[in-house]
Image: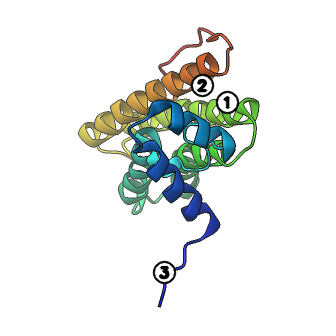
Amino acid sequence: MPVRLSARRLVCTRRANVLSSPNDKNRAEVLRAEGLGEGHGCPEKLDVWKRACRLSADIYKLIGGCANFGFRDQLGRSALSIASNIAEGYGRESVKERIHFLRIAKASSYEAWTQILIGIESGLIDRKIGLEKSEEVIQISKMIYGLIAHIERSAGGKGQGRNPRP
């Protein structure tokens, strides 16, 4: 029985095959012909998305036993929002929309970073683990900033000189 791929998985698979082509000119032509930009529709190929997903899962494990529901809910949502907005941006058609959602993801990283620090200070999060997670949020934020700058340069725009660190 043949393996069935979803339309999204098929696009990602075709893109991966095209990108492995030794001829850069052919690769660029095929991508343009298929309407695929770099990374279009395939956030799972982005290291920043993978790290944001891992961070979100780690945060949920970290705060799972926290008695303060409001804190637990808010930190869980902000951490989840980072990866979710990266993915949503890569599901959008235009560069402008993609950058918009990446900026939302970056703002969510500031929110998660702040909440982790508050959790440490209030004793809701272990200091050592909290500092490790806050450093991971900082690294993810820098990666998002770099991705935004890369997309803007590739699209012919200028980087906005925004702060890469929460």
Q: Is 8 on the left or on the right of 96, as rendered?
A: left
**Can you tell which quarter of the image residue 101 is in?**
top right
Q: Is 67 on the left or on the right of 42, as rendered?
A: left
Which residue is the site of mark 3? 3
Instruction: Tell me the crowding category of disc 2: few under 14, some 14 to 19, or many 20 or more residues within 10 angstroms, Cα based.
Output: some
Tell me if I can see residue 89 in this picture: yes
Rendering coords of residue 140 (x, y %): 43, 33
Q: CA distance from mark 3 to mark 2?
A: 34 Å
Label 3 element class: loop
Which residue is the site of mark 2? 151
Contact? badges 2 and 1 (CB < 8 Å): yes
**Can you tell which quarter of the image residue 126 is in?**
top left
Residue at the image position 60 percent from the left and 16 percent from the top: 153
Tell me if I can see residue 37 in this picture: no
Mark 2 residue type? Ile
Label 2 element class: helix
Q: Total number of numbered labels?
A: 3
Residue at the image position 47 percent from the left and 19 percent from the top: 165
Please state which of residues 53 and 134 is positioned toward the viewer in this rendering: 53
Q: Is 62 on the left or on the right of 164, as rendered?
A: left
Say the numbered circle drawn on residue 165: none
Mark 1 residue type? Ile
Task: From the image, state whether disc 1 or disc 3 is nearer to you.
Answer: 3
Rendering coords of residue 150 (x, y %): 54, 22
Q: Is 81 on the left or on the right of 91, as rendered?
A: left
Say the numbered circle drawn on residue 99: 1
